[in-house]
Amino acid sequence: MLELLHEWLIAPFDYGFMRRAAVAGLALSLAAPPMGVFLMLRGMSLIGDAMAHAILPGVALGFLLAGFSLPAMSLGGVLSGLLVAMLAGSVSKMTGHREDSAMASFFLISLAAGVMLVSLGGSSVDLTHVLFGSILAVNTTALLLIAAISSVIVLILALIFRALVVECLDPLFLRGQGMQGSLVHGIFLGLVVLNLTAGFQTLGTLMAVGLMMLPATTARFWSKRLEGLIGTSILLGIIASLGGLLLSYHLSIPSGPAIILLAGVGYMLSALFGRHHSLMAKLRRRAAPLGAPETH
Amino acid sequence: MAEGQTSRLELVDLQLAQANRTVLEHVDGRFRDGAITALVGANGAGKSTLIQGIMGMLRPMAGKVVCSVPKERRAWLPQQLALDLTFPMSVEELVMTGSWPSHGALKGYCARHYRRGREVMARLGISHLAHRPLGELSGGQRQRALIGRTLMQEAELLLLDEPFANVDAETVEVLMTVLHEMAADGVTIIVVLHDMEQLARLAEEVVVLHQGHARWTTAQAVLHSQPTAAESARLALGIPGVGAC
């Protein structure tokens, strides 16, 4: 039995590419799900998807200019993501339209521009790599970059954590303290872009957002508290990353989709059997008698 | 304001506008330290605009707001709808956020903060709700929690926008007591009110906003010049009676 477990769970990590993929997955799982929790709480769950498309033209341009150079592609991705976020914000401010409509317009333009750029300079294999990533191909340079970006995200998130919480809950309280809510919002969107840039090498620009949003939306079925949501989402991210890698290894299936699909299975099971708001929770709902102690 | 009384908040020939339309102009006056001042006026008279101007969120077109209260000691309690009630936060956590403007956004809370948080909740009668999510509270309970945040903030200037709207009678009593205690401690309190009875019980001074101008008067003057029900209704609608100001 132990031998079987070792063969299934430990032995695959004897390979260097699996170890690097596991570390990359762990680094992303620490940084991405907390961002997803805040996106979800701000009613911006789909903005992550839009931003994932927004980094594509920059990644493609980096690829065209420097080939498969991760630093060049990452830098391009960050710049184009920030540019699109700023343009969407400016257009929304200028026209008075909601930010999501401007974002939707820009992300479609970005997606088309990105695909066009990659197609002009490379083959369909390159396009697939940029769109869907390749976690098993992560080398030491890529791993260092992913770990560094994830560390920076976690640190900055810790720095702006309270301001972010207050901005979500009661933006007027933040403004009353002389802090610009738009500054906090801008830093937060910048972190989302950074996060997606770190994720595109492993999961691709299109699926990097999956590791951000799915653990966060799944956590909502298990906790009602902010720290609970963040902790649970990180745990779910780690399980999805490692589990997806193992499934990919044993079943010979693509690793990126395996990770995101495993997170998706977690979401669906939680929607059925989770502690809060799930189908099961609704069926077993009972009112506590008067005078019963508070449950936390 | 009588001679010799101190004031940390003064409006000097203030002109405020919203979307390039002047809402208030030539507003001159001082708010006495430790006094509760009611802000009355019809819808659109400029109550919220004046509050935004005082809080520094709206840049004056002319004149200025002279306020010596540091930003971290200024609190504004807007109407409840400004809160995102789906956000997963408990009553205790909301009350504790009052300490971060002065304590700093980076440092964690220490035992002193938690002790003070518990005292504040006990004072407002919401200790038993400490771990209850905000979304599960009644309007009155939520308003107590928000006042708790300003107590935690040790506010020296407190602006309240219709604090008794949609709250139960018991909460009104608790909040009245707490506001009187805060004023006795020297806090300058400005409160938007529509109810004559609440104005009589709470405020000493009144600022009436009418047709773009502000007039300072006392609650006594307002009450004695408007004794009838019809006049009360006029004030509730924010229409100052003849000779009220």
Image (cartoon, rainbow, N blue to C red):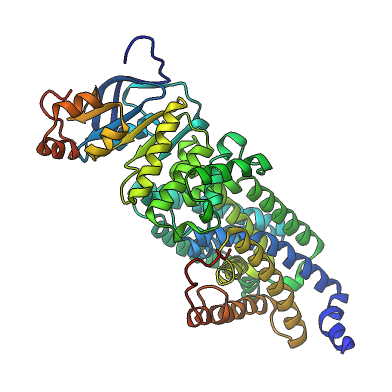
Q: Position of residue B173 (x, y in %)?
A: 36, 43
Q: Position of residue A165 (x, y in %)?
A: 54, 50
Q: Is residue A176 above or below residue B9?
A: below
Image quadrant where one finds the N terminus of chain B: top left
Kindly tell me whether residue B179 is visible in this rendering.
yes
Q: Is residue B46 above or below residue B109?
A: above
Residue, far top? B3
Residue at 38% over, 14% down: B5
State left or right for residue A67 relative to residue B207: right
Kindly tell me whether residue A64 is visible in this rendering.
no
State left or right for residue A19 relative to residue A122: right
* Quadrant of res B50: top left
Residue at 82% over, 70% down: A19
Residue at 56% over, 42% down: B119
Q: Position of residue A127 (x, y in %)?
A: 61, 71
Q: Which of B233/A226 is in front?
A: B233
Q: Is residue A179 above or below residue A217?
A: above
Residue, far front? A291
Q: Position of residue B56 (x, y in %)?
A: 41, 31
State left or right for residue A211 relative to residue B211: right
Tell how many labels. 0
Q: Is residue A52 above or below residue B34?
A: below
Image quadrant where one finds the C terminus of chain B: top left
Residue at 43% over, 62% down: A104
Q: Which of A128/A224 is in front?
A: A224
